[in-house]
């Protein structure tokens, strides 16, 4: 399938999924956790958006919010999430229930959290199909067998009768993908779907997702902390830090010409095939901030080595905004970013 390379913009017009100024906070015993702050992005059908960031960056919370999987007792949500013309934040639970598994589906990191040990794999794939399409038990079972075949499970007719514990880790992940895709969802959210798998199986699963996207034409949100995986599967990237987007663009642009010191740090900390065995990685110094009490100004400032280039206390006092279209939420000028990247960062990535 040919994908059209297009800069993400801020209009939201005509986008299949449009998220606008999303704020998500949780009330805890220790105070209010601002998990997502002012997030906006769009996604078109047939495209894959890779969301990358460390734990606690807000990437998983964003996607659970899209699915309506939050506890309304403790969660406050503001903003707008529009999927194919339907507003989701104000939607009733019964409407969201209809969407989940039908129009929107999710693949989790650990298939054992999504697959029940008590039912056969075939039954678990067939049931959402029956529920959402009204198909007969027999037709749904045939569909489950067909889906297992599509995701590369050998001898699917027999394997459909087995239980999850009889499948290997990679096979369970494939079964969960079959379950997610059984109703041809328009939007598929994959949350670290290959993290627990070895490299060979990971590559097979990524290829499978790409093939299935071509066949089904779904929009995919792919959440990971691994820029290498994003480079392989995504069309666009959104880099998240401390609950907000700090950079976005096409995969080509973000990987070739990253615009934010946090993205530089992520690229720098990736293992490389050509480095010496045992060579030390360069992690980003420090740890992600607590979202109970996030840093003032730029939330990355306690870990950023480039505040001095901005001068004064601007990084500590003023929150940099993500510009529309391509760019990074950082007070460095375009010229400063270019010079730092070319002279200091790029040579380390070679
Ligand atoms: Fe670093 Fe300042 Fe840019 Fe934040 S705004 S990333 S602290 S240079």
Image: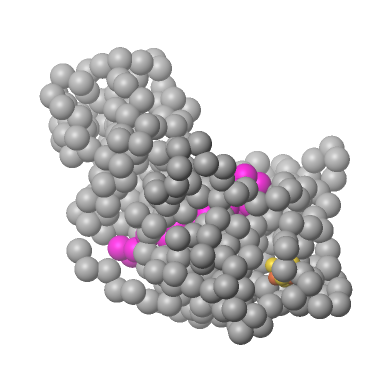
Q: Is residue 192 left or right of residue 344?
A: left
Residue depicted at 40% across the width and 17% down the height: 117
Magenta-colored span: 45-58
Against 197, is 226 above or below? below
Scheme by which the image is coloured: one colour
Let me know if residue 141 is in the magenta part: no
Residue depicted at 86% across the width and 77% down the height: 312
Residue depicted at 20% across the width and 54% down the height: 215
Q: Residue 249, position in %: x, y? A: 47, 71
Q: Is residue 229 left or right of residue 285?
A: left
Against 118, is 319 above or below? below
Main SS, magenta residues: loop
Q: Residue 193, position in %: x, y? A: 42, 40
Q: Residue furthest front?
A: 276
Q: Quadrant of the C terminus?
A: bottom left
Image quadrant where residue 232 sits: bottom left
Residue 85 visible in the snapshot = no
Residue 151 visible in the snapshot = yes
Q: Nearer the viewer, residue 294 or 150?
A: 294
Q: Nearer the viewer, residue 235 or 164?
A: 235
Residue depicted at 45% across the width and 65% down the height: 255
Image quadrant where residue 252 sits: bottom left
Number of callouts in the render?
0
Q: Quadrant of the N terminus?
A: bottom left
Q: Quadrant of ligand 1?
A: bottom right
Q: Is residue 85 left or right of residue 60?
A: left
Q: Nearer the viewer, residue 310 or 297?
A: 310
Q: Nearer the viewer, residue 6 or 161?
A: 6
Q: Residue 197, position in %: x, y? A: 39, 32
Q: Residue 311, position in %: x, y? A: 81, 78
Against 240, is 164 above or below? above
């Amino acid at each position: 399938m040919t994908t059209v390379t297009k800069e993400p913009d801020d209009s939201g017009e005509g986008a299949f999924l449009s998220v606008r100024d999303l704020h998500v906070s949780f009330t805890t015993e220790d105070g209010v956790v601002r998990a997502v702050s002012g997030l906006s992005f769009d996604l078109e059908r047939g495209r894959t958006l890779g969301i990358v960031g460390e734990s606690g960056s807000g990437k998983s919370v964003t996607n659970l919010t899209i699915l309506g999987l939050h506890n309304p007792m403790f969660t406050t949500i503001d903003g707008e999430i529009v999927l194919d013309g339907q507003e989701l934040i104000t939607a009733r639970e019964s409407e969201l229930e209809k969407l989940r598994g039908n129009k929107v589906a999710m693949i989790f990191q650990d298939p054992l959290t999504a697959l029940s040990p008590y039912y056969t794999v075939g039954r678990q794939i067939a049931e959402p199909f029956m529920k959402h399409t009204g198909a007969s038990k027999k037709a749904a079972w045939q569909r489950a067998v067909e889906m297992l075949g599509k995701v590369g499970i050998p001898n699917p007719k027999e394997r459909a009768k087995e239980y999850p514990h009889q499948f290997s880790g990679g096979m369970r992940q494939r079964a969960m993908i079959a379950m997610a895709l059984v109703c041809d969802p328009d939007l598929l959210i994959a949350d670290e779907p290959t993290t627990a798998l070895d490299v060979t199986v990971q590559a097979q699963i990524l290829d499978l997702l790409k093939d299935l996207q071509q066949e089904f034409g779904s929009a995919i949100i792919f959440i990971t902390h691994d820029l290498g995986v994003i480079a392989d599967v995504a069309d666009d990237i959104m880099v998240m830090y401390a609950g907000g987007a700090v950079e976005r663009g096409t995969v080509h642009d973000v990987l070739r010409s990253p615009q934010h010191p946090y993205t530089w740090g992520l690229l720098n900390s990736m293992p490389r095939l050509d480095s010496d065995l045992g060579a030390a990685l360069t992690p980003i110094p420090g740890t992600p901030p607590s979202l109970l009490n996030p840093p003032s100004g730029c939330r990355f400032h306690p870990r950023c080595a480039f505040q001095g280039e901005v001068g004064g206390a601007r990084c500590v006092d003023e929150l940099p905004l993500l510009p529309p279209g391509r760019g990074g939420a950082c007070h460095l000028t375009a010229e400063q970013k270019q010079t730092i990247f070319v002279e200091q960062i790029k040579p380390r990535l070679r």
